[in-house]
Amino acid sequence: NRSDIHYFGAGPAPLPTAVLEKASSVLLNYKDKGIGLCEISHRSPEANEILEDAKKALSTLLDIPEDYEVLFLQSGGTGEFSAVVYNLVSIWVEKKRAKIAAELSSSSDSEEAKKAEVVNRLRKVVDEELKLDYLVTGSWSLKASQEAARLVGAKHVNIAADSRQVNNGKFGNIPAESEWKLTPRGSGGPALVYFCDNETVDGVEFPAFPQSLEGDDAPLVCADMSSNFISRKVDVRKYAVIFGGAQKNIGNTGIAIAIIRKSLLPPISTPATPDLMRELNLSVGPIVLDYPTIAKNNSLYNTLPIFDVWIAGQVMAGLVDTYGVKKIGGQEEISNDKARMIYDTLDKYPDVYRVVPDKSVRSRMNICFRVHGGDSEKEKAFLAGAEKHGLLGLKGHRSVGGIRASNYNAVSIEGAKCLVTYLEEYAKA
Ligand code: PMP
């Protein structure tokens, strides 16, 4: 029975029971219309209301400023690895094109010759100057950087930091900012600077927004918040794009959410045309990843899974109700308390448990540790014992093994306490 277990899966992850109970009824019959939520049109007034409510709840929780747009997408987190590249590179290219075109505007050459010269010069600029900066602090930012290299070519991807270089070839730390090799600001700077705020597999979370990405001439910062979305306060203004899949803290699998600075959308920013990008051996990408198109259509360019948006909206509205004026700060306190409780217990038994990441970057969301130095038989026994206690989903990611307790919002304080009790019992035994 649901009430007998506590689930610590990394995603898909637990959802509030009250939301699921309500979901089972709206699947059959939404607002007494006689049809269910998976059956109604995504263009109906009901769907529009669901979309607006979900946006409003997220905006309230995170204090999203007016000059940011919230988009609902079907890309998964992974699709956004590609979307940020396509969208921000095409903005970067268009800016460069406009500058070169302005420089050539007084030339007496024919319009056609000028156009050809613009492309010629642009090719050189792209070749020499296009850089996308990635901070690689775990397997998800690594994947994102690899996707960027696949889309625009490895020479344009600048790995500004790689945690493995300061941690014996493994993830588990974040290099000091003074060591980062960011593309210099000015003269265009990088098309984007990318980081993953919380690395789900490696249990590494940025303790705070990096100082070296702040300032008036800050680059366009993109952050993957898939696994720590709405778990702490965020100063949205510091980001060009924040994105995350819903299936951990927000809802069920099927949608991702992006928060994007409106000045990156038309009419203020214009992406390069598909033709121009083709001439430069680049691409504007598929239309379903095109932020201007999605924004212009209020996330309804194509059929959005409204049921998934409804779930996310209910989860977020629940947090708005629970925490009131504290907004996401209320959830942050709870998340921190639960994480502290679990880490303190692990630290209490150093002969039995070893937390994988460095203390300075421990994730509040994905608590990764080894039992008896990673002895696989003993870890199996630990997991079997946990299951007997109704503690599920604790197996570490297949790429790294070990144990991972995902401490998402829907994990109750009681759930965290049950885990602590088991950790104590196991260690003492
Ligand atoms: N980023 C992070 C931090 C993740 O944890 C995940 C999935 N676990 C992804 C991206 C990929 O998300 P998706 O499976 O929705 O593509």
Image: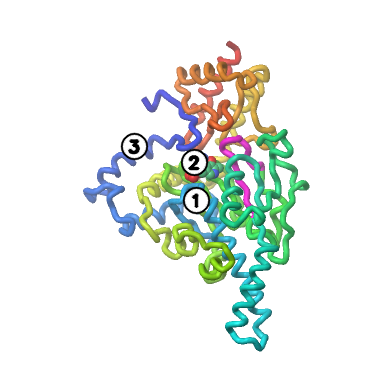
Query: Which badge, 3 or 1, comes first in the chain's sequence?
Result: 3
Q: Which residue is mark 1?
A: 79
Query: Which badge, 1 or 2, comes first in the chain's sequence?
Result: 1
Q: Is mark 1 within 8 Å of ligand 1?
A: yes
Q: In the structure shown, which secondary structural element does the residue marked by tag 3 occupy?
A: helix
| Figure label count | 3
Indicate the amino acid at tag 1.
Answer: Gly
Residue 21, which numbered label? 3
Does residue 125 sit above or below 73 in this rendering? below
Q: In the structure shown, which secondary structural element does the residue marked by tag 1 occupy?
A: helix
Mark 1 and mark 3 in contact (Cβ < 8 Å)? no
* Left or right of 234 in this view: 61: left
List x then y, in percent, for residue 179: 77, 46
Q: In the structure shown, which secondary structural element does the residue marked by tag 2 occupy?
A: loop
- Residue 350 magenta-highlighted: no
Does residue 273 sit above or below 181 in this rendering? below
Cα–Cα gap, marks 1 and 2:
18 Å
Q: Which residue is mark 2?
A: 249
Q: Which residue occupies the foreground of this view, 402 or 147?
A: 147
Cα–Cα gap, marks 2 and 3:
18 Å
> For mark 1, does the 10 Å Cα neighbourhood hold few (<14), some (14 to 19), or many (20 or more) residues?
some
Magenta span covers which residues?
Answer: 193-207
Using the rendered image of the protein, determine whether residue 330 is visible from the camera's viewpoint: no
Indicate the amino acid at tag 2.
Answer: Asn
Q: Which residue occupies the foreground of this view, 106 or 304?
A: 106
Mark 3 and mark 2 in contact (Cβ < 8 Å)? no
Indicate the amino acid at tag 3.
Answer: Glu
